[in-house]
């Protein structure tokens, strides 16, 4: 790859920190299955940082800093588990969701399919507050399952957390394990993603490595290891839509697997080539959307790939300021992890993402 352009890409993250868009972040660029560049800048937790006269953070972001992935959970944990169930013959994408969760049939949803959940065309509303009612995790799930349709399934694409909360429950039903345990066993362990997990505070010694997110009035401090997404937190920190924490290098392993057609190294395999192909081709050609199974494709309203990546690229973003993007034509991947919500939800890294991906694409020689 073009080394000067790699430096240009990392400089964009520096500029975002200087502007105050995010306290810090980690950027990773990979090509042909290998890491070509890895860079960290800024602070992981400004509220706990003391600076010297040079303005250098005592507690900086590091290349191994652990970030709240937010909605990357959907494609890094939930999606591969669903695809593995399909490969094992335990699930079909055309199956009605109610076949696995009978309560889901309420509200006119008896014909909604697993595929429609994955493509955000299920008729479910995007997001609702389920965290301020004092409900238990089970009560929250039952509320999701009992909700009526918000629109006719298949007529439009509406990005829905509720759909992936439901998918996470399907995974638990069919594997007989909690979602976090299933993800650890069937996805993270095979890939060697040793710094990726739900509930990171349960792992000894992880707290100092975690980037803080938003200030929380109830806690009286910034969230540090507690999931930022309120509904995921109310669900106990484990959900199909949010709750995952990871590092740039772990996410690089995941991205490389997708670009390798589901292979792990020379001998292993996490997904079949057929699953990778099915998940990364458009499932919404009849709609003003560009969605694969879980993945955001080129041209979608959520597309953060910039201007130069190829039409075959795909990826996903997370509300906390995270993203992962892959381009099969260029055989490159880009991971960008920030905790932009640390300064408040009005801060944005949308422009940073697009510009970063432009430079990554341009760096591919």
Image (cartoon, helix red, strand yellow):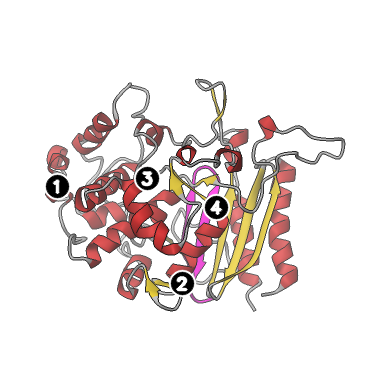
Answer above or below: position of 295 versus 339.
below
**Residue 3 position by quadrant:** bottom right
Res. 10 visible in picture = yes
Segment tinted magenta in the rendering: 311-330
Sequence-earlier tag: 3 or 1: 1
Q: Mark 1 highlights which residue?
A: 98
Q: Mark 2 highlights which residue?
A: 259
Q: Mark 4 highlights which residue?
A: 247
Residue that sits furthest to the front in the current view: 204
**Residue 57 position by quadrant:** top right
User: What is the crowding at mark 1: few (fewer than 14 residues within 10 Å), some, or many (at least 20)?
Assistant: some
Q: CA distance from mark 2 to mark 1?
A: 33 Å
Query: Is 243 in front, or is 303?
Result: 243
Residue 301 spot, x, y in % from top left: 45, 54
Answer above or below: position of 167 versus 251.
above
Q: Foreground mark, 2 or 1?
A: 2
Q: Foreground mark, 4 or 3?
A: 4
Answer above or below: position of 24 versus 345.
below
Residue that sits furthest to the right in the current view: 53
User: What is the crowding at mark 3: few (fewer than 14 residues within 10 Å), some, or many (at least 20)?
Assistant: many
Q: CA distance from mark 4 to mark 1?
A: 35 Å
Q: CA distance from mark 3 to mark 2?
A: 23 Å
Answer above or below: position of 94 versus 216.
below
Sequence-earlier tag: 4 or 3: 3
Q: Quadrant of the N terminus?
A: bottom right
Q: Mark 3 highlights which residue?
A: 241
């Amino acid at each position: 790859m073009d080394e000067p352009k790699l430096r240009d890409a990392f400089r964009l993250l520096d500029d975002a920190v200087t502007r105050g868009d995010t306290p810090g972040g980690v950027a990773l660029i990979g090509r042909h299955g290998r890491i070509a560049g890895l860079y960290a800048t800024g602070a992981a937790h400004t509220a706990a940082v003391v600076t010297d006269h040079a303005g250098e953070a005592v507690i900086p972001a590091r290349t191994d800093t652990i970030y709240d992935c937010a909605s990357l959970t959907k494609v890094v944990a939930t999606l591969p588990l669903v695809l593995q169930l399909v490969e094992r013959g335990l699930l079909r994408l055309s199956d009605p969701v109610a076949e696995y969760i009978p309560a889901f049939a309420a509200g006119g949803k008896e014909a909604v399919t697993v595929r429609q959940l994955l493509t955000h065309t299920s008729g479910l509303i995007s997001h609702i507050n389920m965290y301020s009612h004092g409900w238990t995790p089970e009560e929250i799930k039952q509320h999701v399952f009992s909700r009526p349709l918000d629109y006719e399934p298949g007529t439009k694409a509406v990005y829905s957390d509720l759909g992936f909360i439901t998918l996470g429950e399907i995974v638990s039903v069919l594997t007989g394990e909690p979602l976090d345990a299933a993800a650890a066993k069937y996805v993270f362990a095979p890939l060697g993603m040793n710094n990726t997990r739900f509930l990171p505070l349960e792992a000894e010694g992880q707290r100092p490595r975690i980037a803080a997110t938003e200030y929380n009035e109830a806690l009286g401090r910034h969230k540090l290891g507690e999931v930022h997404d309120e509904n995921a937190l109310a669900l106990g920190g484990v959900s199909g839509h949010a709750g995952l924490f990871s590092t740039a290098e772990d996410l690089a392993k995941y991205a490389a697997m997708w670009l390798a057609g589901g292979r792990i190294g020379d001998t292993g395999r996490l997904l079949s080539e057929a699953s990778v192909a099915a998940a990364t081709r458009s499932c919404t050609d009849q709609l003003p959307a560009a969605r694969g199974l879980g993945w955001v494709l080129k041209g979608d309203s959520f597309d953060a790939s910039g201007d130069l990546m190829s039409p075959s690229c795909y990826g996903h973003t997370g509300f906390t300021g995270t993203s992962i993007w892959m381009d099969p034509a260029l055989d490159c991947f880009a991971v960008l992890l920030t905790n932009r919500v640390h300064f408040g939800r009005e801060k944005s890294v949308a422009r940073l993402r697009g510009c970063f991906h432009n430079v990554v694409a341009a760096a591919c020689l």
